[in-house]
Structure formats: structure tokens, C-alpha cells
Amino acid sequence: MARRKKGRPVNGILVLDKPTGITSNKALQKVKHLFNAQKAGHTGSLDPLATGVLPICLGEATKVSHYLLDADKRYRAKCILGSVTTTGDSDGEIIQQKPVPELTKDDILELLLSFTGLQDQTPPMYSALKHNGRPLYEYARKGIEIERKSRQITLFDISLLDFSITNKNSAIPAFIEIEVHCSKGTYIRTLCEDIGHKIGCGAYISELRRIESGPFLLSQAITLDNLLEKYSLNEPLDAQTFERMDQLLLPTDTAIAQFPAIELNAQQFDRIQHGMTIDVQPDLESDNYRLYFNKTLTGLAILDENRQLKPKRLLFL
């Protein structure tokens, strides 16, 4: 006998503004508990220090979460110059300090431009990447260095938002604030460290905020504090409260809006639901196609070798 899942079969995407000081998984669990959702998953970890856009997929939306993992991101970061920390951010201990050379705005702009484009980046030891089933940061905390493969990333654009190159006697450390548009898998901490290394003085991240993740923007996000203040005080929640909360969720197909949409008739829908192909010639070429029946998203499909649509992932919304 199948075991009954706990929670509600709620589907959709909550764009959360993750607070600093907690892990992405902790934020996810809080949202899952509050919505009493059967299933939940986030779409790309943010460091505990970092804040900003963290799309959380509930229910059937978890089936499209990997498309958001692969999406481009946009960040704002403050890099402190003249120091290196154990973790690459302000949560670590300072292990090296060097004077910051005099830099003009043109010097900084030229430096940032040199970091744009396709390149290889080695993930930091203080990251959630797994080695033998354990995150790298667990090894790092024990002083164990694990060899990591570099990965190819693209930095599409790096803008200078603000900077201050102070003299040695100033109590305010030298810093640069940047906005970065990058591909999946980019570590902004590593970029900041690389910038500091190229300047010759070292650097670490003191503030990091994700302002875009794929199609989702910071303007769409709701803070965890707002969620908890508005709804958790009323626990146990009633059906009307859940109905109001569910209005905060974006439709699942907002995560995959880049794929062409195809409306199925009843016969085509039945074939797709049974894993069979359908003879439909899409107007546009694409890696994936969104399938709808009665204007409801039912799944994703691909073209097979005979140019027929074959179901790739079925959704039950």
C-alpha cells in the first residue's frame, strides 16, 4: 500500500528574498513548513552571507527546477580590498593583509573588463559541491584541501557601482561594489578573490545580493520575515489562509516560458499521458516544448528522430 504523503499538493513557485545568516536549505524548509507543502526544492544555493532572489518550487514545479539551476544570474557584490579570508567572505578569518595600490576609476573599469567573457573558474573549497557524498565546506573546516575541477563559466557583464580607494590611515577599508551578470555555476566569491589577486592586495566579499535568477526578479520577491509575520502567527492555518498564501505563488510555467507552447486536443493529450508520441509539427525549433491541455500545463516534450513530439516530463497540476 502506497504511503500517503504529508502536506498539501500545492504547486507553484515562490520568489523568496532570502535573508542573510541562514542557508538556502533552511529558508526552503521554513517555506515548505509554512505552506504545508508535500514537496519543495530551491533552484540554486545562496551562501549564508548572501541575500536575494531564491526561487522555491513547490509540488509539481520541482520537476522544472533544474531549468532554473541552469539559468543566468545577476548579483550585486561588495568586495573589500587589502585582505584575504579563509572563506573568501566576511564570515571567515583574515589570513593575509596587503596595502591597496592607488587606483583610478579608469583602472578599475579596465580591470573589470578583463574578467568578462568565457573562462574557466575553480570552485572554492567553502562551497556546497559534493565530494564522496559530503559538501566541500566540511573538508575545508577540517583543513583538508580537495582537488577541484575547473568549470567553464561566462561573465557577460561586470558594472562598477561604487568604489573607495582610501589611504592607509583611514578606518574605512578600500572597496569596490560591482554588478555581475553571469552564467550558471559562477562563484562571485571566487571572482572577488581573483580581482583582489590581480590588483595584488587580496579581496573578500562582504555583501552579496542576487537580484535576478533566470526570469525572476528581486521586485517579485517576498521576504521570509514578511511571510512569517503575516501567516505563522495564525497557525494552525485554515483553508482560507492557505488560499490567500497560494496567491503568492507564480505558475509553474513561468520557469520555462522560453520554450514554445503547444495546445493539445483530447486525443493527443491521452497519447502523451500514456507515454506515446504525437504527430505535431511545431512552428519553432526548440530543445523543449511546453504542452497544454485545456490551457493547463501538462508537461514537457521533445522532438524524436522522426520529428514527432515525445513526452519528456509529465506534470499533474
Image (spheres, rainbow, N blue to C red):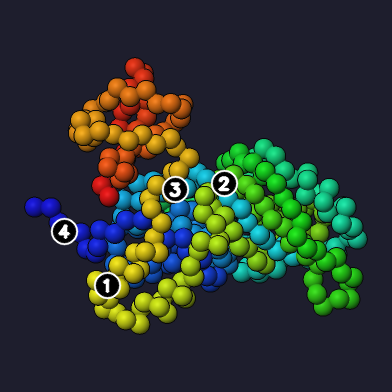
Mark 4 or mark 1, which is nearer to you? Answer: 1
Nearer the observer: mark 4 or 2; the answer is 2
Quick one: SS at disc 1?
A: helix
Residue labelled with disc 1? 240
Name the residue type under label 4. Arg
Q: Nearer the viewer, mark 2 or mark 3?
A: 3
Question: Is the residue marked by circle 4 packed among few (<14), some (14-19), or many (20+) residues within 10 Å?
Answer: few
- How far apart, in angstroms, are the residues tagged by discs 2 and 1? 36 Å
Q: Amino acid at mark 2?
A: Asp
Give above or below for 287 relative to 19: above
SS assignment at label 3: helix
Q: Residue at x 53, y 49 (%)?
A: 214
What residue appears at the point 32 percent right and 81 percent down from the top-left corner? 234
Dot label at residue 4? 4
Q: Is residue 10 above or below residue 113?
A: below
Q: Residue furthest top?
A: 306
Q: Amino acid at mark 3?
A: Ala
CA distance separating discs 2 and 3: 12 Å
Alpha carbon distance from label 3 to label 4: 28 Å
Q: Which residue is mark 3?
A: 255
Q: Upstream in the sequence, badge 2 or badge 1?
A: 2
| Vertical arrangement, residue 59 with respect to residue 183, above or below | below
Please name the residue shown 51% across and 61% down the image: 220
Question: Which numbered disc, 2 or 3, marks the residue that appears first in the sequence?
Answer: 2
Q: Position of residue 274 (x, y in %)?
A: 19, 33
Q: Position of residue 117 (x, y in %)?
A: 70, 39
Q: Is residue 245 left or right of residue 114?
A: left
Q: CB under 8 Å between callouts 3 and 4?
A: no
* Residue 207 seen in render: yes
Placement of 44 over or under 280, stated as above or below: below
Residue 163 versus residue 171: which sits nearer the camera? Answer: 163
Q: Give residue 120's mark.
A: none
